[in-house]
Image (cartoon, rainbow, N blue to C red):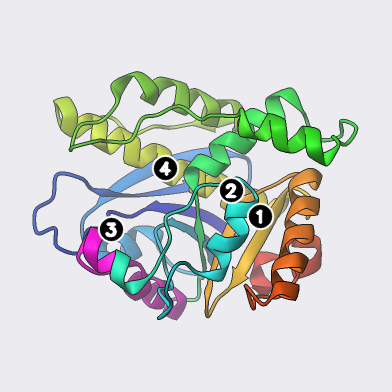
Amino acid sequence: MRAVGIHMVQDARAGDAPGRSAVAQVTPDSVLSGVLMCRSEAEIADAVGPGPALVLVDAPLVVPDVRGRRDVEHVLAWLDIPAFPVTPERMRTVHGGTRGPALARALSGRGHVVAEALPDQVLRQLMWERAHPPGDPPVDLARYRAEWLGVRPPSFRPRGGRARHDGLAPAREIIDGALAETRWPDADRQGDLAALDQAAAIDAAACALLARRCVDSPGDRWAVVGDADAGRIALAACPEMIERAGINIARLRAEGTIGIGPEVAGSALGPPQSW
């Protein structure tokens, strides 16, 4: 199963926006094989190619008619993972609407398995694993939470249309360290436009890296929170995160705050083909 990541420009009002979407793929031998820059949903779907692939997207793919936030954002808040609260009103206010659901339908129609991902969370988990490699003794949950709060990924995304150039190289270095080889695209634009493309490529690569991890790694290295109907997000994980997620999902379900199922670990959900 191929592993693909997408950074999607979410602004539904953008006619000729400066930012471009990006599509990345990580091969079974852990090579970032390239990143393609795209504009339309059709270009993105063509760049993903034929199914089946696990496609993780840096954008909301399900926007249910709820107030406040989706079930998945309730869970992420209790895992200290920042996430944009997704509601129709917020998407209209901030982005002028939604692009992700149409893309998800198009990709699913081509035989792909599609879910959301959070590139910052992937980078944070990779940083965590530098200090706590897989196989190390488990960390007490109180200590885990305190240390997790201190893990901060580099800031490299645009603010006010300008990329943060000083964060691009550190973010790429984190991804480089988790793969056997990375083939970052050559810039075909100049100045801030080139930096915007580099930032998009990093987000897409982080999503593709996580997709590869979900396909190939044991169930204690990744998790899925949510479901296809209400919104689901794949996470780069460790046993401590999965334990903490399970505790909080059980509590939130008992309170009636969320309605999603209790499964959080890959070992409980099965491989991505079964999502």
In the image, what residue type sits under mark 1? Answer: Cys
Q: How many angstroms separate mark 1 from mark 4 (CA)?
A: 17 Å
Mark positioned earlier in the residue sequence (1 or 3) = 3
Q: How many angstroms separate mark 4 from mark 2 (CA)?
A: 11 Å
- Residue 62 location, quadrant: bottom left
Q: Residue 121 carries which label?
A: none
Q: Give the range drawn in magenta.
A: 91-110
Residue tagged 2: 210
Q: Can residue 218 be seen from the camera position used here?
A: no
Q: Does the magenta run of residues contain 109?
A: yes
Q: Is mark 1 on a helix, strand or loop?
A: helix
Whether tag 1 and tag 4 are in contact, CB under 8 A, the answer is: no
Q: Residue at x 29, y 71 (%)?
A: 89
Kindly report which numbered mark, 1 or 3, lies closer to the viewer in this rendering. 3
Mark positioned earlier in the residue sequence (2 or 3) = 3
Q: Quadrant of the C terminus?
A: bottom right
Kindly report which numbered mark, 2 or 3, lies closer to the viewer in this rendering. 3
Q: Which residue is drawn at 65% across and 66% down?
A: 272
In the image, what residue type sits under mark 3? Answer: Gln
